[in-house]
Every structure is written in C-alpha cells, then in structure tokens.
Image: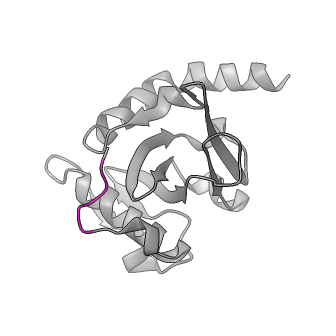
Amino acid sequence: MKGKEMTNWRILNEHDLNRSGVNMIYDALPSKDVTNKLKATDILGQNTPYDILWNDNKLCVRVANVSTTSRFPKWSYTLKAVNKQMVDFYIFIALKGDNVYKIFVLPPDIIPETTVSISERLGNVRYSEFVSSLEEIPAKIESVKEKLPMFRKLYREAKI
C-alpha cells in the first residue's frame, strides 16, 4: 500500500506526520451521501480529541513509523486516555520506510487507554481483523460497528 505520491513520510516530524495522515484519510473518505465531512482540527484547533468528523463518526488519526529498536516490526501509538470517551474510531497508519504499510480501524473500547503497540511476527499482525485499505475505510468502519459486541466480549474475556 503506497502513501500519497507527494508525501515524503521519512522527513516529517511527529506533528507533520499526523497532519499528513489526517489529510490522507480525509481526502480518501467520500463526501457523497454522508451527513457530514469535516476536519475537526481546522475548526476546533489542535487540542480536539478527534481529527475528522465523517458521517457522524469521530475519527482520531495517528501515524507511526516502524520501530528500529525492536527485534521484529512494531508500531506504537500514544493516546490521551481522556479522549477515549469522545472518539468513535482510531485510524492508525503504520509506515515502513516511505510507504504506508497498513491502516487499522480500531474502536476505542478494545484497545489500551494510552499506548497501543501493533507488532508483526512471523507474518502475523496484531489487530489484523481491523486492517483496511485506504479506499475501504468506510466499509471497515461499518463492519467493525456490526461486530463490536463480539469484539467487546472477546476483549473483556481476554483481560480476565
């Protein structure tokens, strides 16, 4: 999966990485037949708990480069615990080099509160059920919504 042709992900600092990620996701979301589509950060500023309001879904976009200190590919995303109640979906963009490697669409109630680590070992990727292509994000959001009761149950049982 390629990132935007004009984005050189490697040279961006963390703030610009996330801003570029928000722009990429925003541009990929359809505006036809949706109730609304806007960048919350353009209206509310940088401290808003979510980045995009799309079709009544509050989306928080985070971007991470692959870790170079781990023995296997790993991406880490830092979140604010207080924002978790105000976000419907986290969109995590995993970069490898200068390319978008994977995009994850995750609901907040099945991930840790402050740090989410996604790892890949022997071809298995954590949260693989939530991987989406850029074009399929709207369908993935709907699919995850439908399966959310099952995901919540699995998450609760795993924590016991």
Q: Position of residue 18 (x, y in %)?
A: 47, 67
Horizontal side of residue 123 vs 5, given as left or right: right
Q: Position of residue 121 (x, y in %)?
A: 62, 29
Viewer-side residue, 78 vs 37:
78
Residue at image position (49%, 26%) is: 129
Indicate the quadrant containing the N terminus: top left, top right, bottom left or bottom right.
top left
Find out whether residue 65 is within the magenta segment: no
Indicate the quadrant containing the C terminus: top left, top right, bottom left or bottom right.
top right
Q: Position of residue 7 (x, y in %)?
A: 31, 68
Scheme of image coloration: one colour
Residue at image position (76%, 19%) is: 157
User: Total number of numbered labels?
Assistant: 0
Q: Quadrant of residue 74?
A: top right
Horizontal side of residue 21 vs 158, given as left or right: left
Above or below 24: residue 6: below
Q: Position of residue 38 (x, y in %)?
A: 31, 65
Horizontal side of residue 140 vs 149, given as left or right: left
- Spot the residue most to the left: 32
Residue at image position (15%, 46%) is: 33
Above or below 38: residue 147: above
Residue at image position (65%, 35%) is: 110
Viewer-side residue, 124 vs 18:
124
Secondary structure, magenta segment, majority class: loop
Q: Which residues are magenta?
A: 2-6
